[in-house]
Image (tube, grey):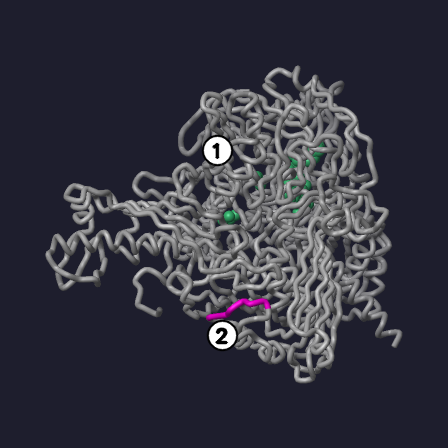
Amino acid sequence: MKIVFKINGKQVSMEVKPSLLLIDLIRDVLKLKGTKPGCLEGECGACSVIVDGEAINSCMYLAINVNGKEVSTIEGLTGTENPLHKVQDKMLEHGAVQCGFCTSGIVMTTKAYSDKCLEEGITPTREEVKKSLEGNLCRCTGYAKIIDAAEAVYKK
Amino acid sequence: MDFDVINTTTKDELLTAIEDHQDTNFRIGAGYTDLIMNLRFQPTEGMTLINIAQMKDPSFISIEEQQDHIVLGTLVTASNIVNSPLIKLEFPVLHEAALSVASTQIRNSATVGGNICNASPSADMAGALVALKAVCCVLNSKGEERIEPLASFIVGVGKTSLDKNEVLKSISIPRNSGDQLKSGFEKVGTRNSMEISIVSLAYHFQLDESGKVVDAGVSCGAVAPTIPFAESACDFMVGKDLDGLSETDKEEFAENVLKYATPISDIRASEWYRKEVLFNISQAIFD
Amino acid sequence: MKKNLKIIGKSHKKLDGKERVSGKAVYGHDIELPNMLHGAILRTKYPCANLISIDTSRAEALGGVECVITAKDIEVSNISFKRDHPVLKNGTVNCNRDEIAAVAAVTKEIANKAIRLIDVKYEVKEGVYDPIEALKEDAPRINEFGKGEEKFGNKNIAETFHYDHGDMEEQKAKSHVIVKKTYELPRVTHACMATSNITAEYSEFDGRLTLWSSTQVPFLYQRDIAHALKMDPSKIRIIQPIIGGGFGSKLDMHPFEPICALLSMKSKKPVQILFSREEEFVLSPTRQPMIITLTTGADEKGKFTFREVDIIKDNGAYTSWGATTPFVMMQTFSSLYQIPACSFDSKAVYTNNPFAGSFRGYGNPQATFALETNIDLMAEELGMSKAEIRLKNANFKGEVTGQGLHFKTCGAIPALEKVLEKSNYDQRATERKEGRYLRGVGLGSMLHVGGGAKIYRSDGCGTTLKLDDYGYLTIITGSNEIGQGSETVLAMIAMEELGIDEDKIKVINTDTDVKPWDVGVHASRTSFVAGNSLLGAIKLIKEKLSKKASELLEIESDSWTYDNGVMLANEQEIKIDKVAREIHFGSPHELCSVTYFYEPPSSFQDKEFKGDVSGNYAFASQAIEVEVDTVTGNIAVLGVHVSQDVGRVLNPVGLQGQMEGGVATGVGYALTEEMIYEEGILKNPSFHGYKILTTTDMPPVHFYPIETYDEAGPYGSKGAGEAPLIPTAAAIANAVSDAIGVRFNSLPITPEKILRALSEKKEKELVS
Ligand SMILES: Cc1cc2nc3c(=O)[nH]c(=O)nc-3n(C[C@H](O)[C@H](O)[C@H](O)COP(=O)(O)OP(=O)(O)OC[C@H]3O[C@@H](n4cnc5c(N)ncnc54)[C@H](O)[C@@H]3O)c2cc1C
Ligand code: FES
Ligand code: FES
């Protein structure tokens, strides 16, 4: 099946197997290894990417359904002027990264939520920040530093 | 996983695809949050998937405000529901149920139609919709529509009343007639997030100005093969003044809810716990 | 020891944090080698059976399959701590993990499909899943390689430990209260976010094997792989890609690792095995499930008199490092709080359950749960405050315990006092409890090794330092980074000591062909041992540098300071890179490079398990407040106060992260996590069924470090990584009991257990 979509700002068009999952398209076909497979069952969020502005689990998503859409992965956050996106900077600064396997997913979920908050002009409460990350499991950090970092992103 | 996909973007394409596949093994795919796990554990060779995720037809994808009903297209996602001010205002039970589904990422994909058609007794949005006395609008491959109350649409674990040539198009919820509401969704699980309900209770009481119940809707999840509408508990509540409920009233209400529970024991909880906790939360919603 | 430091003690960002946060870090899952095949393993369908036949012909015929192996195709030795575990099973299978055959194919899909085409005929046998049943005379022998009969008088005993000190009879006679309780601890697992993986490449030309492995003990692993494959250890090179979580899970070598090597040897191509999440749950090691019977006594003033401990551990079908957890548990029983007499017995018993392994805390969470619950019960019987009884018996500086542990520094009392104060314990503990939500507060303390633990012949670590012509420093360390932040601490030490900027420092630690020996990451030892090793190397390189600098500046000084790339003495200065160049290009024409090996001063324990086993010891207390919802039985942890003697804080942000992460795992152990096994089969092998905490479940953690400046540790520090989860479950259980007045002798304390307890309590109250 032919699909046309944007990945990290670049338009691509390719033939894919209809049953291909988005995570496999990203990791195995496009070789973008920053998106992580933690469970392949929608439970851990390590595979989170942004499709048309919304964070989704790429392990629960058919590749063909990105047709006509815009996909961003962790690799797309690395800009030319700033090597790291604000979300990434804050994660580092607050010590939110230990083994780092959950980190890509957490960064992408936070990026999507912070864009949304920015658009709507709201600063979420700590409880709302926690809720926004409920689908991202992390076994190393106990989350506190992750929430701190995310809160720092939303602070004006 | 290895299957073929037919992509449909309009109602006509969808109906044709269904019509063309009457003799083959096919499934309908919406948000895929249930389906992918399903397909991973079964042979999928020779199977066709009719993909409706890219459907453009508004009757499938939008939340429509009508005079007497709010109509949810089958592809409305849990996030769409959570973000709808209208639903939050009129149907808090549905807002809370949708917000309790898994995570942001899953809610962004999970559709209300998929939640219903998957026919799990622990489906949260379906539970709220049963309490709201929602009605399903079903379309067959000839383009004919039929209407069926959600409570009878789900007939058992993983089973709906859909025929092979039918698809769920939308769900309509009757709008409130009362002046005030007591409406909410209680979800019981071990963690605060990422839980499939061990037990759930959806309730939607409409009250008149004085606080008397004029209409009641209650359903319980994960305690029976379907999501039962607790009719006798509703009947018991109609006419009652919510502020003036006695402890015995609360207990009687909870006992009425419990009549609909025929839970099983599984690794997540025992039959005993499910009943005990359903009784307890039914009583506690009035505290 | 309290000298003023510039870098140490201040929060420092993770050294390779940028790679990790940008998705550029390469984990095992991300490795792709040219011509690489994908491996898959066929496991038994039944936990206990005879293998009648294995037919691989259909798998071999499948297009894309390059090789299939079974036990009869390979020439290997048994693996595991007791060498009682065949790599591929032949004849019988003994637990649900057992490997029967393996396939390498050009894609993952084909490999998985091939596995399904292998036809195995079983003769199913009745398994033994209860260690108490397994101890009975008429139980079948479970592990044919076990030496139980000869060594311990029972065929199904894998290992035993006995320890005692003090005059038991005398102490019993002194006791005013005696509490005897039996506790049951569940099977839980690490649930690392990255599943287990390995990539193997064998070169038929020189017989060398390269493994990209997530082991946390590469040099022991090299030896284990060599033993399994009957190879020369030096022909095996272990490369450690970035690890997505360790926590002890990567201490043992597991069958899939030599299997992957064998597939590569046979196919002559690189082979990779990645576990699915389900495999990860079924296959990765677990914390030891055990039954602990604990009898403790105290005199009328509340001074502890004696402890008698009897433990039955479910060893599972084979024996891992986990069988040695009594080393740690006996320390807790013999030495946590002052204790005149203690006797300890443990048996690890073979069953047809999966075998346990090592897990952060290494037996200590189980021991601490039992002990701290008994202490609460004794306080209740004595009518004494739970805080007072603990303070009265707390360990102290200078104490040499019955087991011979020497507490040269000890923060036990300050830690306890801190959490009592910060949690407002006295007031909380006496509050009235009523309504739907009942609150309670509980205490737990712990003792753990803080300076490594001598259980292998060497507990040391080597370091090589290279200062190049441009003033850049390379630290080649034997130690490993598994996400815990040890690399960062090492770089901080070098910055502190040598005044070199972070961006001029590189840490190399991933390749056994390059790095010097180290025993591996365990026992909270890395910062301690690798830090001391680095300090030793720095001392050597400073000698070199200062000698040359003195020569160049024509001064005599033995007190050089290093700051900002410059060496200073007698108000003169010289750039460090210039000194390095002069050493290289001038006489004596040497490289500015040194190697040092550090062996901690700890001693081996004697045959009676007595001796000062660690360089120093860590102490901690936690006070935890919970709220029990009596309607649902759910427990919310409202706040965790942690105070820990860490010797000295090296990197505050890193340390705090270890605390929070440890507490999260401890809360999970107490409340939500359990591997549910029925007849040897795991019923919840997914993140859905196995519930680790989410963001919305995580309580706030308030951390108060206690600094005791222990001479043995780098800058006075002690190991800290395991401690934060050790007393958590104990403190939570004590808090729940405080809230609802019911004791739980098993974990996890689920909502269902709470509601049952409340309803039983109500019934009892009605009756009386
Ligand atoms: C990690 C995780 C957590 C979850 N947590 C929750 C939770 O908390 N609460 C909860 O209720 N659910 C939960 N779910 C289940 C799931 O997300 C929901 O049931 C979701 O609403 C399903 O919708 P979908 O669009 O993804 O359905 P799909 O997976 O696309 O489809 C589900 C089923 O419905 C059929 N179907 C879909 N649309 C139609 C249609 N229009 N007509 C006919 N048949 C149709 C499909 O053929 C399939 O059989 C969870 C799932 C995961 C993976
Ligand atoms: S890998 Fe997709 S949610 Fe875990
Ligand atoms: S940092 Fe290791 S899982 Fe989050």
**Magenta-drawn stretch, dominant element (helix, strand or loop):** loop
- Residue range of the region highlighted in magenta in the rendering: C403-408
Give C128 or C229, whichever is nearer the viewer: C229
Q: Residue drawn 43% across and 70% down? A: C708
Task: Judge whether A56 appears above or below C662 on screen.
Answer: above
Disc assigned to residue C236 = 1
Local SS, label 1: strand
Along the horizontal axis of the image, is C260 left or right of B152?
A: left
Q: CA distance from mark 2 to mark 1?
A: 46 Å
Extreme-bottom residue of the structure? C301
Corner quadrant of residue B5: top right
Q: Residues within 10 Å of mark 2 (few under 14, many from 20)?
A: some
Look at the image and tell me in which quarter the N terminus of chain A lies: top right
Corner quadrant of residue B159: top right
Rendering coords of residue C441 (x, y %): 63, 72
Rendering coords of residue C10 (x, y %): 36, 61
User: Are the residues under marks 2 and 1 on the same chain?
Assistant: yes
The subunit carrying tag 2 is C
Q: Which residue is mark 2?
A: C397
Residue C379 in view (yes/no)? yes
Amino acid of disc 2: Lys
Q: Residue drawn 59% across and 80% down? A: C392
Look at the image and tell me in which quarter the C terminus of chain A lies: bottom left
Mark 2 or 1, nearer chain start = 1
